[in-house]
Image (cartoon, rainbow, N blue to C red):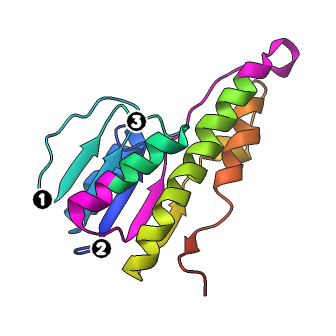
Amino acid sequence: MNGKVIVITGALGALGKVVAEEALARGARVAGIDHAASQFAATADRIELGGVDLTDTTHASAAIDKAAAHFGRLDALINIAGGFTFEAVSDGDPATWQRMYAMNVMTAFNTSRAAIPHLTKSGAGRIINIGALGALQAASGMGPYAASRPACTASPSRWPPS
């Protein structure tokens, strides 16, 4: 990872923080994007873009472009951003399913789409989508999450495809 520029969505969540710290420890430069407010001032090796709604294509594109401008390029995108709601189908609300779809699918789609031009320029471009075991082994009440989360984690990809 030494010298690579990596964008991490959901970078201020529990998993995102660990991934960002590990990437930094391995010599990567990290742009963290999250809905939560930023926690660190920008440095040569790290920028946090907080308050970003990745379900909105305009916000996702602006954040990706800002990360690329800060570092001069992007080499990888790690999509971790998402959400979880516990709700049984029997008394569930269709709005919950729509929110889970937006948070767990559209965030990955929007950031991937925005990052592709930068990753293509890099020549080393990678997109990694991270899900959770709960998406594969769901229990009662996990329907909206289990239906939406696997959609963004089909497989890691290389850009451009070979």
**Which residue bears the numbered disc 3?**
52
Q: Secondary structure at mark 2?
A: loop
Q: Earlier in the sequence, mark 3 or mark 2?
A: 2
Would residue 93 be counted in the magenta stretch? yes
Quarter occupied by residue 146? top right
Q: Residue at x 73, y 20 (%)?
A: 95
Q: Residue at x 22, y 58 (%)?
A: 70
Residue 145 vertical placement versus 67 (above, below): above
**Which residue bears the numbered disc 1?**
44
Q: Secondary structure at mark 1?
A: loop
- The amino acid at mark 1 is Ala
Label 2 environment density (alpha carbons within 10 Å; few <14, some 14–19, many ≥20):
some
Label 3 environment density (alpha carbons within 10 Å; few <14, some 14–19, many ≥20):
many
Magenta-tinted stretch: 66-95
Report the side of 89 relative to 134 (left or right): right
Quarter occupied by residue 30? bottom left
